[in-house]
């Protein structure tokens, strides 16, 4: 059985003669890119994507947060195409949403740390491979390359300070 992202099943990251700017991705770099993309956190993926989705979030009746895609959102500025990559964290469509009174401790939560973790070297390698082998990234960012100032502003391994933390001004109904 062929690998999931391979020319044999029509799902190649860069099919020869079509997707890759160099006529295809060498197998070792294809495997590296697939593995790397699978290892990136939610925040890291947001920093390397060319466009941002619209996300809508709301407080559910029992106090939990809910969200849905493909909706206009007040929490982010709507879809936009990045002029350079990586995106600044405050322009990547990321928000940390916490309950009333927990803004000060949100970054200590292991789940928050896992989802919003950013590793500078992983971002750099993913962008290098995407610009080299993905025709869309090559077309948009091939001439300008990686924004080294934005890259240097990211933490070596941590949560960027500029990700907005949104919180309720009052406790959710039914939670005392």
Image: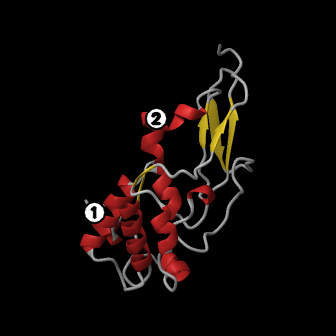
Instruction: Report the quarter where the C terminus lies.
Output: top right
Q: Nearer the viewer, residue 148 or 139?
A: 148
Q: How is the image coloured?
A: secondary structure
Q: Is residue 166 visible?
A: yes
Q: Which mark is residue 108?
A: 2
Q: Is residue 11 visible?
A: no
Instruction: Report the quarter where the N terminus lies.
Output: bottom left
Left or right placement of residue 92 versus residue 40 in this view: right
Q: Is residue 165 above or below residue 46?
A: above
Measuring from the top left, give residue 70's x and y in whole percent.
67, 51
Say which residue appears at 50% left-offset and 74% top-offset.
147
Q: Is residue 152 above or below residue 63?
A: below
Q: Is residue 93 above or below residue 123?
A: above
Residue named by callout 1: 2
Q: Secondary structure at mark 2?
A: helix
Upstream in sequence: badge 2 or badge 1: 1
């Amino acid at each position: 059985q062929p690998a999931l992202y391979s020319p044999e099943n029509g799902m190649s990251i860069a099919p020869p003669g079509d997707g890759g700017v160099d006529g295809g991705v060498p197998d070792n770099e294809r495997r590296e890119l697939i593995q790397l993309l699978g290892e990136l956190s939610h925040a890291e993926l947001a920093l390397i994507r060319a466009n941002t989705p619209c996300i809508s979030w709301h407080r559910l009746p029992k106090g939990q947060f809910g969200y849905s895609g493909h909706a206009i959102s007040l929490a982010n500025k709507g879809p936009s195409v990045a002029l350079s990559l990586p995106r600044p964290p405050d322009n990547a469509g990321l928000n940390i949403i916490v309950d009333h009174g927990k803004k000060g401790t949100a970054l200590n939560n292991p789940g928050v740390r896992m989802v919003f973790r950013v590793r500078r070297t992983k971002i750099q390698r993913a962008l290098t491979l995407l610009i080299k082998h993905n025709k869309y990234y090559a077309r948009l960012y091939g001439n300008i390359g990686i924004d080294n100032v934005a890259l240097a502003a990211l933490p070596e391994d941590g949560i960027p300070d500029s990700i907005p933390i949104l919180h309720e001004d009052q406790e959710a109904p039914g939670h005392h």
